[in-house]
Amino acid sequence: MPVSLILITIWMFLAVLGLISKLISMDRLALNRQLFGDTLAIINYGIGWAILFAFIGFIIAFLWRANARLPFICFILFLLVGDTLGITYSLLSIDRVIAVLNGAFDFPAKFPTSLLIFGLVASFLFHLGFYLLVIYFVQKNKSFFEKG
């Protein structure tokens, strides 16, 4: 297995562990209810479970060398679209996000809006670069997935 695919598989294992910890945390669900409302919070929670199972499936596919390259690339693009929608929603409702942040965490002063905007944009750019790099390495090593 090429080193880049090993690193991607390790990233998927870490993503599974992170998703499990996020999904079993009821504080996270309560925070999402404050941000999105009940319906969207439950939908977001369900999408989190679907992403968890997809990551587990792709880990198995990578280890078995199944030809799951194109579905995996589509999955990564789905994650990128989800990040884009999440960042857009956060930027459009920045006042609500700041209010929830100030209520959920004990900051000594009001959380600065400019810092949150910078963090959201920087996070999005990092995710964009990372996801494109993952797609590049999966595409570059496509011969690994072709059983011969």
Image (spheres, rainbow, N blue to C red):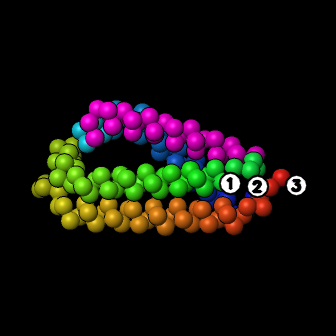
Q: Quadrant of the N terminus?
A: bottom right
Mark 1 falls on what kind of element?
A: helix
Give the alpha-carbon distance from disc 1 to disc 2, as whole Å.
Answer: 7 Å
Foreground of the two, 23 or 77: 77
Three-letter residue code for mark 1: Arg
Give the alpha-carbon distance from disc 2 to disc 3, as whole Å.
Answer: 9 Å
Task: Examine the rendered structure and indicate whether residue 126 appears above or below residue 34.
Answer: below
Q: Residues within 10 Å of mark 3 (few under 14, many from 20)?
A: few
Three-letter residue code for mark 3: Gly
Which percent across, then down, holds residue 79? Answer: 49, 52
- Mark 1 = which residue? 69
Three-letter residue code for mark 2: Phe
Residue 45 sits inside the magenta stretch? yes
Which percent across, then down, holds residue 100? Answer: 20, 45
For the record, the magenta segment spans 36-64
Foreground of the two, 35 or 17: 35
Q: Residues within 10 Å of mark 1 (few under 14, many from 20)?
A: many
Q: Earlier in the sequence, mark 1 or mark 2?
A: 1
Residue 28: image quadrant is: top left
Q: Which mark is residue 122?
A: none
Mark 3 falls on what kind of element?
A: loop
Q: Earlier in the sequence, mark 3 or mark 1?
A: 1
- Mark 3 = which residue? 148
Task: Examine the rendered structure and indicate whether residue 45 appears above or below residue 125.
Answer: above
- Mark 2 = which residue? 145
Q: Residues within 10 Å of mark 2 (few under 14, many from 20)?
A: some
* Residue contact between numbered discs 1 and 2, judged by CB atoms under 8 Å: yes
Which percent across, then down, holds residue 65? Answer: 76, 50
Q: Residue at x 33, y 65 (%)?
A: 121
Q: Quadrant of the C terminus?
A: bottom right
